[in-house]
C-alpha cells in the first residue's frame, strides 16, 4: 500500500496523486495564444461524425474523364503502326490466342504480357493526364 503513494522518479518527479490534473496548455513562440492540444480527427460533425483525414470526395470522380480518356487512348492505340497492326489489335488478338488454351496460363515468354503492360500503361497515363487537365480546367487552375 505504501508503494501507491510514493513519488515516481522521472519527469519533474511528479507523484501518482497528480495524475488527475487538467491537460496542460501548450505555450510556444510559434503559437499566437496558449491553446490546449486536441485531436484533429475529432472535429464535431465532420463527415457525418466519422473520423476521417480526407474530404469525402477526394478523388472527385467524373465520368467525362473516364469516357474521354478511354476514347483518347483507343484512337491512337488503334492506328496500325506496329508492322501494319495496331496495339489494340495485337493486345486483343493475344487475348484470343491465350484463351484458346484456357486452363493453361500464358507463358512468361508470350507476347501477351508485353501487349498487356503496354496497352494498360498507355491507358492509365491517358486517364491520369485527363483527370489533371479536366479538373484543372474546371477549377480554374490554369488561369493566370
Image (tube, rainbow, N blue to C red):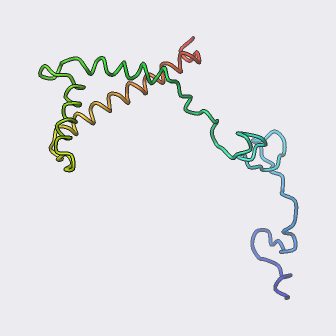
| Residue 76, position as x, y percentages in the image | 28, 18
Residue at the image position 20 percent from the left and 22 percent from the top = 86
Of all residues, the one furthest to the bottom in this rendering is 1
Q: Is residue 121 above or below residue 44?
A: above
Q: In this view, does 143 lie above or below 31?
A: above
| Residue 62, position as x, y percentages in the image | 52, 24
Quadrant of the rendered image containing residue 15? bottom right
Count of labels in the image: 0
Q: Is residue 95 left or right of residue 60?
A: left
Q: Is residue 4 left or right of residue 70?
A: right
Locate the N terminus by quadrant: bottom right
Residue at the image position 18 percent from the left and 19 percent from the top = 81
Residue at the image position 37 percent from the left and 28 percent from the top = 125
Q: Is residue 99 left or right of residue 7?
A: left
| Residue 83, position as x, y percentages in the image | 11, 22
Quadrant of the rendered image containing residue 66? top left
| Residue 142, position as x, y percentages in the image | 53, 15
Locate the C terminus by quadrant: top right
Closer-to-camera residue (95/28): 95
Residue at the image position 78 percent from the left and 46 percent from the top = 28
Closer-to-camera residue (35/97): 97
Of all residues, the one furthest to the left in this rendering is 83
Amino acid at each position: 500500500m505504501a508503494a501507491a503513494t510514493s513519488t515516481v522518479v522521472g519527469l519533474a518527479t511528479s507523484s501518482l496523486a497528480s495524475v488527475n490534473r487538467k491537460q496542460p496548455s501548450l505555450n510556444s513562440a510559434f503559437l499566437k495564444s496558449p491553446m490546449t492540444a486536441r485531436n484533429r480527427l475529432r472535429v464535431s460533425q465532420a463527415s457525418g461524425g466519422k473520423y476521417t483525414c480526407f474530404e469525402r470526395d477526394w478523388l472527385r470522380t467524373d465520368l467525362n474523364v473516364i469516357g474521354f480518356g478511354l476514347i483518347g487512348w483507343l484512337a491512337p492505340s488503334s492506328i496500325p503502326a506496329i508492322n501494319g497492326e495496331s496495339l489494340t489489335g495485337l493486345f486483343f488478338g493475344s487475348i484470343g490466342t491465350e484463351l484458346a488454351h484456357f486452363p493453361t496460363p500464358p507463358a512468361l515468354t508470350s507476347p501477351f504480357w508485353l501487349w498487356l503492360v503496354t496497352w494498360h500503361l498507355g491507358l492509365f497515363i491517358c486517364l491520369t493526364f485527363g483527370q489533371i487537365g479536366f479538373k484543372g480546367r474546371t477549377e480554374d487552375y490554369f488561369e493566370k
